Structure formats: structure tokens, C-alpha cells
Amino acid sequence: MVCAPITTQQSVSVEQIANDMYQAKAEDADIVEVRLDCITNFHPPKWEGGLYEGDENMQLEALQLAVELGADFIEVQLKVPLIAYSVGERGLISQLLSQKFGGFFVYESLAGNPIPGLPSLDNIQEAYKLEHVKADTKVFGLISKPISHSKGPILHNPPFRHINYNGIYVPMFVDDLKEFFNTYPCPDFSGFIVGIPYKEEILRFCDEVHPLAQFNRLNGKPVTSPETLKNQSIAEPVEIGQTEHGCNDGGASLGSPLAGRLFVLVGAGGAGIALAFGSKSRGALLVIFDINFDRAKSLACAVFGEAQPFKELVNFQPEKEAILANATPVGMLPNTDRIPVAERLVFDAVYRLRRTRLLKEADAAGAITVGGVEMFLRQAIGQFNLFTSLEAPEEFMREIVLSKF
């Protein structure tokens, strides 16, 4: 069951609480929790964390009256530990996985009254459908910090349900990888996507690493089988596949259309590393920019390319037929610095916007453009296949991307 707590930072009237209850019903909450400590001049005793120091019989009488008036449940505070719910980004999984581990219901927040760490009722209904979560449900998720940006739940959970797969995908705010894996080693946690800032550090926890990932730093690919933490990274970077497709003009070619072309890469992190190795393996000539010049030089050395200081990017003039790939947040708010547009093709790995500033400028300049949304979709399809050992419902997932992104 989904529970909407009627709570606020300030004391409210009984009338306001009644209005919030009607709102919760309209948003399809199964149950509401009326917090007596939020009612004006009605506070819990101090041992519960409240301000009230008077006779506790007053509260017991109110609860007894609630029973007589037909309340489905009442909560009695005891001075012993019971089930703990956590709030904030770190506590989100305690809500989403509550029913899997024996919880009775899940707390959610009402629209217009968000509570940190409590997803909204709309989000629960659309992305999670927690009524399907059982004790034997397999858990997959994003290991990252932060996690609020993640679009994984809306892209993975509906396809799980679409093929009747008993799984749930949740974002996991992780402060310490070692502590995380010591805490969650059980078979219930069946696979992870690795995000910022752990794409490189995660390698220390893998018993087996795909050769491509030795330098590729996983690039956000799944780590599965927590018992051994094996990395089953996708060997063919989807970013390069998308770039080749855009550069091919639809014609047949015996070799890669990247061969012999100047490939200007902005960003030497996770996605940038995959782009660098993928393009180099296809014969491209690389020039790499990164805000961390040492990182740019390290990657350039590994792929026999050239590193340039990031401050020179704005004045860089790519040669004709060059390809530009952006693997940084540049172009998205608040990172609105301009990236020079290549004449031939521009690829932007940013997926949170379908048309970034960079892609709009590239369109205006007549370049072929390839966006990060398609890359994100293809990554998700690969992740789904590895997680489930089943074939992902690609068209269903594409419909989600087109409607939600």
C-alpha cells in the first residue's frame, strides 16, 4: 500500500488536514497518515521528538476516538525500536524496497508538498508500481552520487512489467563503495549500473573485468552477479555506433566512415574514454580537450592522439569533414560555454535534453547531428539484456523515451 503522510513544517488546522486527505485520495493514495503533532496546539511528548510535556492521556483519547470513528489503523509510539524509514536521497531505497523486506506500506509525498526522500504518488504509479514488489523481486539499480537526475527507473521498470519480469530498478545514493557492498552482498541485489563518481573506483571491487573496461572505466555499463561482482561491460561502445551511423550517409562502406577523419573529443571521462578508444580503433585521428589537462594528455597518449588545453576550445577551428563529439555537460545549464561546431558531424552525449544548444547550432551550420537520447536508449537496452538474460522490448522502450525525454 502507498501511504501519504499529512505533514508540514508548520502547525495546521484540522480543515487543512481534511483538504490534504481529499487531495491524497484524488492522487490514488491507498491510505493517509494523519499526524497529530502537525495539528495546531496538539504536540507529542518530548520522548517522541515533540514539544508536549502535558498529560499523554489526551493523545490516547484522540487515538481511541479515531478507532471509534472508523480509522483503519492507528499508530502507537513505543519506547522500543521498530521498523525504521529513512528520508533524504540516501533513504529513498528504504521506501521503494520496504514491501520486499517485510514493510507494511510505503510513505509517499503529495503533489505540491514534496518531502525529501519520499517520491511523489505520481512517480510511484508511473515508474515503480510498488504493488508488484514481493519478497522474491530481484533488485537492480544505479550506484551514484547524486541520484536525483536518474531517468533509469522510468526506462527500466515499465519494461520489466511489460514482459512480466519480477524485478525493480531503483536509484541508490552511495557514499562509500566498500561499505555499500559489505552491506548489500545478498542475492536480492542482482545488478548495478555504475554512475558518477564511481566509474573508475568500481573496478577495485570487480573479480573479473572485461579487457575493454581496463581503460574504458566501465562507462556506466552493468556490474552483475554481486557474489563475484563480475563486470559484463558492453564491448561495442554505443556512442561510436551512433556516430558511425550518422556519418555513413546511408551508403554502404567497406571500412568505417571514421577512418582518416579528424575526431575532436571534448571530455576525457567515462563516455569520452569509450569514444576515444572506439574512434581510434576505426582509424580516426583524435584531438582531445578536457578541463583536466593531465587527464586529456593521459587519454591522448593511450590512443596516440593530441591533447589540447580546455581554454583553447572556444578558439579551435576544426578542419573540413571533422567530427565533433561532446562527452561533457557543456551546453546545458549552467554550463553554457560554447563549443565550436564541426562541419561534418556533431555528436552530443548529453541525454537529459533531446536538443542541446550544441546540436541546435550544429543544425543551423548544416552539420549532421546525433543526440545522446538515442545513445541512452541503446545503453538501456544493453543493460536490460544483461540484467534479465532476456531480449529487451526495444520498441516499447523507444516509446517511453519519445514520450518522457
Image (cartoon, grey):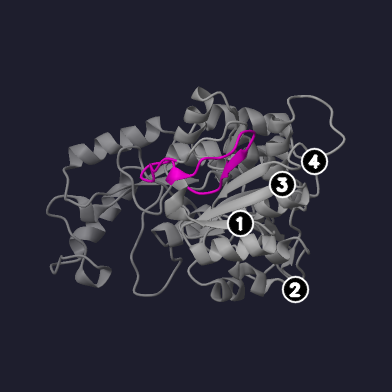
Q: Residue 106: horizontal and vertical position, in percent? A: 47, 51
Q: Which numbered disc, 1 or 2, marks the residue closer to the eye? A: 1
Q: Which mark is residue 207?
A: 2
Q: Nearer the viewer, mark 4 or mark 3?
A: 3
Residue at mark 3: 284
Magenta part of the chain: 314-338
In the displayed structure, 196 sits above or below 249; it is below
- Distance between the alpha carbons at the discs numbered 4 and 1: 40 Å
Residue that label 1 marks: 306
Which numbered disc covers residue 391?
4
Vertical comparison of 55 with 384: above or below: below
Tags 3 and 1 touching, CB below 8 Å: no
Q: Secondary structure at mark 4?
A: loop
Mark 3 or mark 2: name the one nearer the start of the chain.
2
Question: How many neighbours does mark 1 have within 10 angstroms: few (below 14), some (14-19), or many (20 or more)?
Answer: some
Between the residue at mark 2 and the residue at mark 4, the CA separation in whole angstroms equals 26 Å
- Quadrant of residue 184 in the image? bottom right
Give the amino acid at mark 3: Ala
**Going from the N terminus, do you reach mark 3 or mark 1 first?**
3
Front residue of 181 and 267: 267
Give the crowd class for mark 2: few <14, some 14-19, many >=20 residues within 10 Å: few
